[in-house]
Every structure is written in C-alpha cells, then in structure tokens.
C-alpha cells in the first residue's frame, strides 16, 4: 500500500495536538470539547467526569 500524504498529514497534526496536551486523554477530550463548541459537528457524545480534572 502506498503512503497517502493526506493520512500522513492527519497523523502528524493529531500527534502534535496530543503532544501539546501532554498525551493526557482528559486534557485532549477537553480540548476537543472546546473545539466542538465552535462548530456544529459533534465530536463526543458524553462528558468526562469532573473528578478527573487536572
């Protein structure tokens, strides 16, 4: 299978975003929830638990 430049770029961006949030799942979810507020597209169906706040 040949390397797809679009997929490669998506992976690079996803990796950079994860790194910016310390590869912390809770912080990543919060980041995407903030992005979600700015768009009509829904990324997640449920909220993360507040007791996991960083």
Image (cartoon, helix red, strand yellow):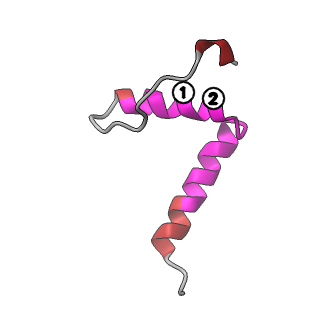
Q: Residue furthest left?
A: 40
Please state the horizontal and vertical placement of residue 6, each as a whole percent of the image.
46, 69
CB atoms at circles 2 and 1 under 8 Å apart? yes
The one of 46 and 40 positioned closer to us in this rendering:
46
Q: Vertically, is 54 above or below 28?
A: above
Q: Which residues are magenta?
A: 11-36
Q: At 59% from the left edge and 59% from the top edge, which residue is drawn?
A: 12
Q: Quadrant of residue 43?
A: top left
Q: Secondary structure at mark 1?
A: helix
Q: Is residue 41 left or right of residue 10?
A: left
Provide the residue designation for mark 2.
26
Provide the residue designation for mark 1.
30
Mark 2 is surrounded, within 10 Å at the Cα level, by few (under 14), some (14 to 19) or many (20 or more) other residues, namely some
Q: Magenta part mainly helix, strand or loop? A: helix
Q: Secondary structure at mark 2?
A: helix
Q: Is residue 36 left or right of residue 3?
A: left
Give the quadrant of the C terminus.
top right
Gap between marks 2 and 1 measured at Cα:
6 Å
Instruction: Indicate yes or no whether the magenta region holds residue 43.
Output: no
Mark 1 is surrounded, within 10 Å at the Cα level, by few (under 14), some (14 to 19) or many (20 or more) other residues, namely some
Q: Is residue 47 left or right of residue 50?
A: left
Please state the horizontal and vertical placement of residue 3, each as a whole percent of the image.
55, 81
Q: At 48% from the left edge and 34% from the top edge, which residue is drawn?
A: 32
Q: Is residue 42 visible?
A: yes
Q: At 34% from the left edge and 36% from the top edge, which residue is drawn?
A: 42
């Amino acid at each position: 299978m040949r390397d797809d430049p679009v997929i490669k770029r998506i992976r690079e961006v996803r990796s950079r975003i994860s790194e910016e949030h310390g590869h912390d799942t809770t912080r990543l979810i919060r980041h995407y929830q903030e992005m979600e507020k700015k768009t009509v597209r829904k990324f997640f169906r449920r909220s993360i638990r507040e007791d996991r706040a960083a």
